[in-house]
Image (cartoon, rainbow, N blue to C red):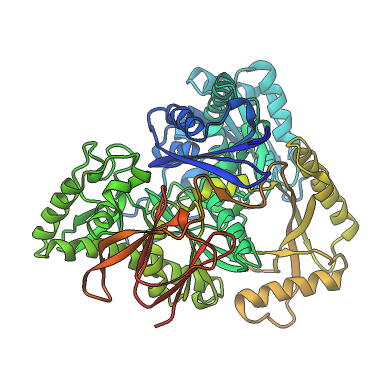
Amino acid sequence: MSASLSLGIDIGGTFTDLVVLDPSDGRAVIWKESTTPDDPARGTMLGLMHLLKKGNIAPGSIGRVVHATTLFTNALIERKGAPTGLLTTAGFADTLEIGRERKYELYDLFLEMPKPLVPRPLRREARERLAPDGQIEVPLDVEAMLHEVAFLAEAGVTSLAICFLHSYANSVHERLAAEAIKQKFPRLSITLSSDIAPEIREYQRCVTAVANAYVRPIAEIYLENLEKALKQAGIPGSLFLMLSNGGLTHVAEAKRAPVQLLESGPAAGALAGAWFGRHAGLDRVLAFDMGGTTAKLALVDDGEPLVAWGFEAARTKRFLRGSGLPIQIATVELIEIGAGGGSIARRSDLGTLHVGPESAGAQPGPVCYARGGYEPTVTDSDLSLGYLNADFFLGGAMRIDLAGAERALGSLSTSMGLEPLRGAFGIHDVVNENMAGAARVAIAERGRVPQDYALLATGGAAPVHAWHVARKLGVKHVICPPGAGAGSTIGMLMAPARIDRVASFNMSLASADLSAAEAVFSGLEKDGLAVIRETGADMAKARLRRLADMRYIGQGFEITVPLEGNSDRQGILAAFETAYRKLFGRTPPGAAVQFVALRVSVSAPMPGAGGKLRLDGQQTSDAALKGYRDVYFADLGEKRSTPVYDRYALTPGTNITGPAVFEENESTFIVGPGARISLLPEGSIMAEYVS
């Protein structure tokens, strides 16, 4: 290998995936290590040791490290962040409690709303007031404000969010407060809403700022310790972090705004789906990523995943929109559609089969892991159905207790009056139906139909379930890329550097000063380019995109409109109407349009991001058939002896008729009857349903 290798590390709920990529020839070495929830870094470094040994890689040859983690998301979900305080405008301390006054389940009398990250006693008020246009109505009383902060410091607060009314229009009071607080309380971590989310909507902006403050001290300590551990391991390469928007940034930016990392791992999965889809000649892909805990879907149009400008974290009801904390950041549009391989199956109070959302995680894990788990999971059912090979789990690196899994499944099936095999397939089928149902709704909401897409599976569990999910959706083509089990980690190694910036610009289109808009865009671009430059990205290939949040005057919400090539009033109006019709089918006649905010997205390719992939150990051989295994298919109504192929030994152009099983170290691809299967030149397996 060359002296400029790239290392990817993705810490998931069940496994920590590590990949070393040589960009010169695309060679990749993959290792999956069980996540250590008590200390994620411990599992990471243990996995790194195994990875380097497996690939005979010298630590000094690694030129960069790319990392994604669920640590900060888990801190929000489990309420294990830093002791955080909130400083607001007088009269607005209850913004976090009031929320939007919307019920996500209208008729639930016992509705549980997401609990604020900052308890009421730690939400203090400052005497100050700005008008909606940013004009100062009441000057900031600095002395009184410092008195409130002193109370928070004495209460043990280590991180402070400052969210003043209308600071998106003028940040002067927030910055004045921050300067005074830093002088008097230099150890206090400070987050300004005008830095993190300078947009309208008080509740969402406040929640985003508070979430950033809540995880920021954790992020600073974690990233410093990780950098130190990597250096001690002899790795000289710089550390980069995967962001929720599908791009990379440097450590300083991640420490400043770690809220941008909340969806980093799943975003990398969507990037992998887009990257593999492009290499397979597909520009419309449903990127299906299913791991040990969750399953998510991302729509890829024209080779790029869709991007949203906000999402919900730490939902009270996992699949119900409105039950979580609204976070205003740029993020790859990810749809959580179901459970993961570790999701637990139980008999419900109504006597029906219920799967998830509770997960066995990494500890104790599924019953077959033999680590103390006793309730059957999706992985246990897949093993019993013959989809997984107990002797080849993680390439044989992990011992699996098949008998224990079948006992647990038998006990559950008996309690429901089912044959064990029928109970096992019931778990598998319930999960697939739940995912297909959620995917149908999500795809329809975006004005698309599933049949226009190919389903591309990444993650340890997705290749096992993708064929059956595709059949339920009516999707004819299913793609399993090489290294699918570590797809998210591969995706982040292909990711560009990216930064998104936003500024409030609340004016009607007819009366807006477009030269002022140009000045705002230029300022955002200058800031974004400065951050990108610090990553060492290839600035000669930097791409700048201008967008605007717009709506018809009087509407309560806006849409984000690309403005590339449109700088005059008519061009901007045409771009807005085109985007509006795409979503809603028609535009209201004679309605006036307004700007709400202006956005800039800056990206540039990273050195060392490979343009190809070649798995370590891959070989060219005609002896791809490993043997036969009894596998259950609902189409056949029974287990059927099914050919099992060595994924690494398949040659491009190979054509096979389903059913078939394809094994690689990190995942197994299951294809049912009626399929025409071929190995594409870039290494992906394509299965097409033909009958």
Residues 90 and 196: in front is 196
Residue 545 as seen in the image, left or right of residue 620: right
Does residue 481 lie above or below 65 as drawn?
below
x, y percent for residue 326? 52, 50
Residues 141 and 469: in front is 469
x, y percent for residue 499? 70, 46
x, y percent for residue 324? 45, 51
Q: Quadrant of residue 260?
A: top right
Residue 322 is at least partly visible in this image: no
Residue at point 39%, 38% (across, down): 78
Spot the residue most to the right: 515
Query: Quarter holding the N terminus?
Result: top right
Residue at point 70%, 34% (across, down): 174
Query: Quarter holding the C terminus?
Result: bottom left
Residue 687 is at least partly visible in this image: yes
Residue at point 75%, 43% (across, down): 170
Does residue 440 lie above or below 233 as drawn?
below
